Amino acid sequence: MQDWQFAYRTAMMETDRQKLIPKIDSALALLRDRLSQLRASPQHSQERGRISDALRTLDVLRDIETRPARARGA
């Protein structure tokens, strides 16, 4: 398992709301770094696709978690 995969899974599994945003931010940074490493490499298209999906998922989760509690339905 690569670092970005571990960071993504760790963020997605976090249940402590105090730790969630820092873990999301850390995972996003690792994902973006890995994506920039792969940009020039056509043989890594599947990994780039998985990273893009993970980035979108974490961006949505971060957006939801940073909304005021009232907007989240809490």
Image: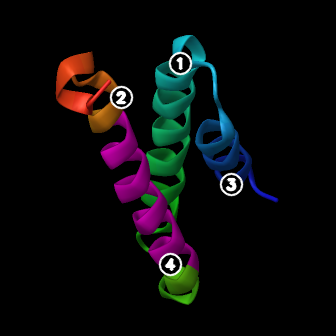
The residue that appears at 43% across and 73% down in the rendered structure is 40
Image quadrant where residue 46 sits: bottom right
Most distant residue in the front direction: 74
In the picture of the structure, the residue carrying the numbered disc 2 is: 65
At a point 50% along the width and 33% down the height, the residue shown is: 24
What's drawn in magenta, residue-wise?
Answer: 47-62
| Marking on residue 17 | 1
Disc 1 marks which amino acid?
Answer: Arg
| Mark in front: 3 vs 2 | 2
Q: CA distance from mark 3 to mark 4?
A: 19 Å
Q: Amino acid at mark 4?
A: Ser
Q: Is residue 68 above or below residue 41?
A: above
* 8 is higher (above) or lower (below) than 62: below
Mark closer to the chain start, 1 or 4: 1
Q: Determine contact: label 3, label 4, CB under 8 Å.
A: no
Dot placed on the residue nearer the N-terminal end, 2 or 1: 1
For residue 22, side relative to residue 71 (left or right): right
Q: How many C-alpha atoms fall within 10 Å of the one at disc 3: few (<14), some, or many (≥20)?
A: some
Q: Earlier in the sequence, mark 3 or mark 1?
A: 3
Judging from the image, what secondary structure is the residue with disc 1 in? helix
